[in-house]
C-alpha cells in the first residue's frame, strides 16, 4: 500500500505549481483529479454515454465531445440535475483514481483534488496538504492565468470551501502568497523539501 497525500487549495492557489515541484525535484507520482474528471467523459466512455442519454444529444459538440458550457448551464440553479451528475461522475472518477494509484512507483503519491474538502474525499487519502493563499492572491493570479473577469473568480471563490474550512482540515500547510522571486522560489522549495522528508518517514509505515 502506498501512502497518499491529498493536495488541495482554492482556485489559483498554486496546486499545480506545488505538485510540479514534488514531481520535478523528487520524482513523486502525481494523480490529478481534474485530468481524471475529463477522462471519464471522453467520447465513447460510459460516462459520456450516460450523460447523453440523460440530457440528450444537444449536450455534445459537433465533433462528439462533451459541451462543458452547455452542461454547466443545464445544472446551474438545478440542484437535482447537479446531484444526478455528481452521483454519476464521482464514483467513476474515484474508481479511475484508485486504479491509477495502484501504479504508483514513488515512495508516496500526491493526489491533487481541487474540491477535496467540499466533496468529503478525505477517505481517499492518508494525509492532507493545503496550499494556502489570501483570497486576493487567488483572484489576481486566476484572472491573470485564465484571462477572466474578477467577478467570475469571485463567484467561483464563493462556491468553494472557505480558507478557514480548508485550513481546519489540513495536516500540513504550504503558504504560497509570496510572488515567485528567486528568493521566494528557494523558500517554497525548502518548504516542499521539509514536507517531502516528513512524507518519506511517514511512508515507511505504509510499506
Ligand atoms: P491551481 O492549480 O491551484 O489553480 P496554479 O498552480 O495554476 O494554481 O497557479 C495559479 C497561477 O498563479 C498560475 O498562472 C501560476 O503560474 C501562478 N503562480 C503560482 N504560484 C505563484 C507564486 N508564488 N507567485 C506568482 N505566481 C504564482
Image (spheres, rainbow, N blue to C red):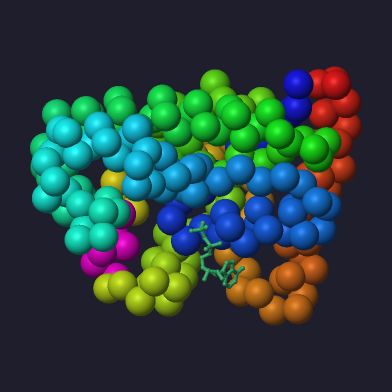
Quadrant, the N terminus:
top right
Place of residue 95 in the rendered image (x, y in percent of width and height, measured from the top left): 50, 26
- Measuring 85% from the left and 21% from the top, which residue is drawn there? 207
Instruction: Ligand 1: give its quadrant.
Output: bottom right
- Measuring 48% from the left and 36% from the top, which residue is drawn there? 116
Residue 88 visible somewhere in the drawing: yes
Place of residue 126 in the rendered image (x, y in percent of width and height, measured from the top left): 66, 26
39 vs 22, nearest the viewer: 39
Place of residue 14 in the rendered image (x, y in percent of width and height, measured from the top left): 56, 59
Residue 133 located left or right of residue 145 = right
Q: 141 above or below 18?
A: below
Image quadrant assignment for residue 104: top right
Task: Specify start and end residues of the magenta stretch as a single range.
Answer: 150-156
Number of on-image labels:
0
Q: Is residue 152 magenta?
A: yes
94 vs 144, nearest the viewer: 94
127 vs 103, nearest the viewer: 103
Majority SS type along the magenta span: helix
Place of residue 109 in the rendered image (x, y in percent of width and height, measured from the top left): 71, 38
Residue 148 located left or right of residue 123 = left
Q: 137 above or below 156?
A: below
Q: Is residue 75 magenta?
A: no
30 vs 147, nearest the viewer: 30
- Measuring 76% from the left and 78% from the top, which residue is drawn there? 182
Residue 160 visible somewhere in the drawing: no
- Measuring 34% from the left and 32% from the top, which residue is drawn there? 46
Amino acid at each position: 500500500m502506498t501512502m497518499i497525500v491529498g493536495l488541495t487549495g482554492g482556485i489559483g492557489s498554486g496546486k499545480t505549481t506545488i505538485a510540479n515541484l514534488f514531481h520535478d525535484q523528487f520524482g513523486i507520482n502525481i494523480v490529478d483529479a481534474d485530468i481524471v474528471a475529463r477522462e471519464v467523459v471522453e467520447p465513447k466512455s460510459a460516462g459520456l454515454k450516460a450523460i447523453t442519454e440523460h440530457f440528450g444529444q444537444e449536450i455534445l459538440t459537433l465533433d462528439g465531445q462533451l459541451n462543458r458550457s452547455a452542461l454547466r448551464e443545464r445544472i446551474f440553479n438545478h440542484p437535482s440535475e447537479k446531484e444526478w451528475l455528481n452521483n454519476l461522475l464521482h464514483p467513476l472518477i474515484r474508481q479511475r483514481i484508485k486504479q491509477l494509484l495502484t501504479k504508483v512507483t514513488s515512495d508516496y503519491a500526491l493526489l491533487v483534488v481541487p474540491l477535496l474538502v467540499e466533496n468529503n474525499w478525505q477517505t481517499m487519502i492518508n494525509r492532507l496538504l493545503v496550499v494556502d493563499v489570501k483570497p486576493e492572491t487567488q483572484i489576481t493570479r486566476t484572472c491573470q492565468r485564465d484571462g477572466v473577469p474578477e467577478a467570475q473568480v469571485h463567484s467561483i471563490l464563493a462556491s468553494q470551501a472557505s480558507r478557514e474550512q480548508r485550513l481546519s482540515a489540513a495536516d500540513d500547510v504550504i503558504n504560497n502568497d509570496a510572488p515567485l522571486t528567486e528568493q521566494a522560489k528557494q523558500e517554497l522549495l525548502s518548504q516542499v523539501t521539509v514536507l517531502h522528508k516528513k512524507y518519506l518517514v511517514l511512508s515507511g509505515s505504509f510499506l
